[in-house]
Image (cartoon, grey):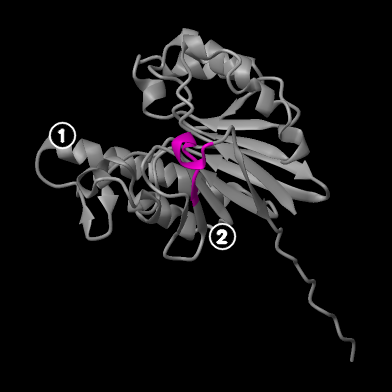
Amino acid sequence: MIRVAAVGDVHLGEDARGRLRPALEKVGEHADVLLLAGDLTRHGTVTEARVVAEEFGGLPVPVVAVLGNHDHHDDKPAEVTQVLRDAGITVLEGETASFDIDGHTLGVAGVKGFGGGFAGKCGSAFGEPEMKAFIHHTMGIAERLEGALRSLDTDVKVALTHYAPVPDTLRGEPPEIYPFLGSYLLGEAIDATGTDLAVHGHAHFGVEHGMTPGGVRVRNVAQPIIRSAFTVYCVEPAVHVEPAVVEV
């Protein structure tokens, strides 16, 4: 069994040093890896990124992150990413990370994601250039997520995003803002690739549990939802049985 800890939307500012660290020091007792589902900072400044690095760097388990919309606000996502990587945190945007855990392999594919909405109530690449650009941006990100997930040859696959891949975990959010909270295209990428678990944040007033149309577990780990430094999900690696060879 692989234990996946996760949290998102911690929104750390310069006044948050040490807030999470005492609980995070014990993450190795409960989990094999820690996933960060974006919005790690309040305004995406490099100074705030250093606080995140101090809180989540040097933990007893690998830490894998994606950025969120807040982490882009100061227009320095590359600098924020570098600060986190310098602290030993793996930051993904269309890439993957793989880990050997107790004889099994775990693969994580990560993207920030973007908006657009969900089946029956979504935007389309039609009309003004601005609308086309909005939807094309989401399409490109979903394609990168699908490509990253397909590239993984691991016992367990996890999709890590900031934006939601399904509307299930948005219940409690105003329906009018669903198009800005996620996209069904992310869910389609997850369903097309044999993914075992999808983790996201962003929806502070949603719910924790959801599922893709294809039956993949989706978990909203925004801290206002899980109300803790992290939560843990256990994923059982699939049992691969070699076909019997019968000699005649």
Q: Position of residue 136 (x, y in %)?
A: 27, 41
Q: Residue at x 41, y 46 (%)?
A: 143
203 to 168, vertically: above or below? above
92 to 54, vertically: above or below? below
Q: Position of residue 102 (x, y in %)?
A: 83, 47
Quarter where residue 203 is shown: top left
143 to 223, vertically: above or below? below
Q: Which residues are magenta?
A: 219-227
Give the structural element (helix, strand or loop) at label 1: helix
Q: Nearer the viewer, residue 148 or 236?
A: 236
Residue 31 is left or right of residue 125, and the answer is right
Residue 130 got which mark? 1
Q: Residue at x 48, y 25 (%)?
A: 40
- The CA distance from mark 1 to mark 2 is 34 Å
Q: Nearer the viewer, residue 141 or 31?
A: 31
Residue 119 is left or right of residue 148, and the answer is left
Residue 226 falls inside the magenta stretch: yes
The reply to whether callout 1 and callout 2 are in contact (CB within 8 Å) is no
Question: Taking the image as drawn, is residue 247 in sight?
Answer: yes
Q: Position of residue 197 (x, y in %)?
A: 56, 53
Quarter where residue 30 is shown: top right
Q: Residue at x 44, y 28 (%)?
A: 39
Quarter where residue 238 is shown: bottom right
Mark 2 or mark 1, which is nearer the start of the sequence?
1
Q: Nearer the viewer, residue 195 or 52?
A: 52
Residue 103 falls inside the magenta stretch: no
Pointer 2: what residue?
Answer: 194
